[in-house]
């Protein structure tokens, strides 16, 4: 087997390195390099120097420093002489016997103490687990939102229009199970879901599971309820101003409302326009084309931040918005783009954007708020 010194010398010669080159590139004195290869370890001023030089020299030659250090330690162990008296002396069996007896006595003592403690331990009075019964609670949502902790069987009543809608907490596990007006629904932690309370009015209930522990159903769940009340779209009354219809007839518009309505465009003739809606946040948006027989019907949709919607129209569009600040409206027509403010933050707005004809026959595209 190749010795430590031979391994170093063979690696150096295999790379064609001279002592001077190794000294220059490793900053290790030549006498120490030669001492490592000759295994003349007494040359070094201390073992710390020897180990450091051996590690650096091995890395320089591309050898594993740990293997070299292990070979050095094995070599040192072989060099340590065994005292002659230890080789000649027969080992005595007395210490081994004493040790075995001590272990047996210790085991017997531990077993005896355990038996004594078991027989003489103080008796604890039997305890009965008392489970507190809790009656299911009923809460009433008397504002735009309600947030609190609910437990199994708790219910919340949500007034909407002339009706009250009920949501009951059925269970808490991997998900929260609720009995809603739309049936049983599951909602996970941090998740939000929407439930339609009244398709006719468009009232929507949003439920958010704010906090619950899946491995501790007894702790209940923190729920948040938000209701968006969107009034039904209604027409105006009066008969002083008119809006052009697809059949060429005139539909009545309130005179006071038409006069005070913000004007987007004015023109001798009505022309097609496009409403561009850019959503800044969560919003229920409803729209309906006015006076176009082939495009009848109302549409509505929930929009999120960065969503966009384009609505082309000939005569007018009726819109409903659950939060006026959540949408930015632009009207595009006649080669121009005009921004239109429809309301304030948190305000529910129902309005027409449509052409109105004045008494002198001119047309104005106006924003007509509907109450």
Image: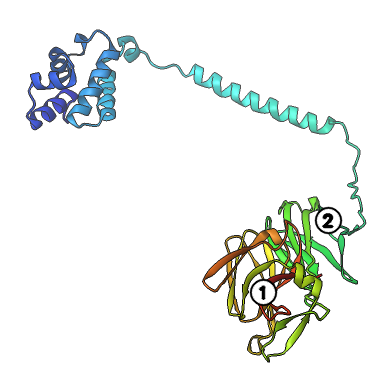
Residue visible at 16% across and 29% down in the picture = 2
Q: Which residue is mark 2?
A: 151
Q: Which mark is residue 200?
A: none
Residue visible at 50% across and 17% down in the picture = 94
Q: Which residue is mark 1?
A: 364
> In which quadrant of the rendered image does the N terminus lie?
top left
Q: Does residue 362 appear to the left or right of 121 in the view shown? A: left
Residue visible at 27% across and 18% down in the picture = 51
Residue furthest to the bottom in view is 247
Q: Does residue 332 appear to the left or right of 359 in the view shown? A: left
Helix, strand or loop at mark 2: loop
Helix, strand or loop at mark 1: strand
Question: Marks 1/2: CA distance?
Answer: 57 Å
221 is higher (above) or lower (below) than 340: above
Mark toward the viewer: 1 or 2: 1
* Mark 1 Cα shell of 10 Å, populated few (<14), some (14-19), many (≥20): many
Residue 99 placed where, x, y %?
55, 21
> In which quadrant of the rendered image does the C terminus lie?
bottom right
72 is higher (above) or lower (below) than 329: above
Q: Does residue 94 appear to the left or right of 129 in the view shown? A: left
Tell me, yes or no, whether the two marked residues, 1 and 2, touch with CB atoms within 8 Å.
no
Residue furthest to the top in view is 45
Q: Does residue 291 appear to the left or right of 276 in the view shown? A: right
Residue 223 placed where, x, y %?
77, 56
Instruction: First in sequence, mark 1 or 2: give its number.
Output: 2
136 or 338: nearer the viewer: 338
197 or 339: nearer the viewer: 339
Residue visible at 76% across and 70% down in the picture = 259
Q: Is residue 370 visible?
A: no
């Amino acid at each position: 087997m190749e010795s430590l010194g031979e391994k170093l010398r063979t690696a150096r010669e295999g790379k064609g390195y001279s002592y001077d080159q190794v000294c220059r590139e490793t900053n290790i004195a030549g006498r120490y390099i030669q001492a490592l290869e000759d295994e003349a370890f007494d040359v070094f001023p201390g073992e710390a120097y020897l180990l450091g030089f051996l590690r650096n020299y091995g890395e320089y030659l591309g050898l594993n420093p740990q293997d070299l250090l292990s070979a050095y330690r094995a070599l040192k162990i072989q060099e340590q002489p065994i005292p002659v008296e230890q080789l000649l002396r027969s080992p005595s069996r007395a210490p081994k016997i004493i040790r075995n007896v001590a272990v047996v006595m210790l085991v017997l003592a531990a077993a005896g103490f355990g038996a004594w403690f078991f027989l003489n331990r103080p008796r604890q009075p039997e305890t009965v687990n008392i489970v507190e019964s809790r009656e299911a609670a009923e809460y009433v949502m008397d504002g735009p939102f309600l947030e609190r902790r609910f437990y199994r069987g708790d219910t919340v009543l949500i007034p909407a229009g002339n009706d009250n809608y009920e949501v009951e907490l059925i269970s808490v596990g991997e998900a929260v199970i609720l009995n809603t007006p739309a049936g049983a629904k599951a909602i996970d932690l941090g998740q939000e879901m929407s439930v339609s309370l009244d398709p006719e009015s468009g009232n929507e209930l949003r439920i958010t599971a704010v906090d619950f522990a899946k491995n501790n159903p007894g702790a209940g769940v923190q729920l948040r309820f938000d209701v968006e009340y969107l009034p039904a779209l209604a027409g105006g009354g009066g008969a002083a101003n008119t809006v052009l219809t697809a059949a060429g007839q005139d539909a009545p518009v309130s005179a006071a409302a038409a006069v005070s309505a913000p004007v987007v465009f004015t023109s001798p003739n009505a022309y097609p326009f496009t409403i561009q809606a850019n959503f800044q946040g969560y919003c229920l948006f409803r729209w309906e084309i006015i006076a176009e027989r082939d495009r009848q019907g109302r549409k509505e949709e929930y929009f999120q931040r960065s969503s966009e919607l384009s609505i082309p129209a000939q005569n007018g569009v009726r819109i409903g918005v659950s939060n006026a600040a959540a949408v930015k409206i632009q009207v595009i027509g006649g080669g121009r783009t005009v921004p239109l403010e429809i309301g304030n933050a948190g305000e529910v707005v129902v309005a027409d954007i449509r052409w109105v004809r004045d008494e002198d026959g001119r047309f104005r595209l106006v924003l007509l708020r509907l109450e």
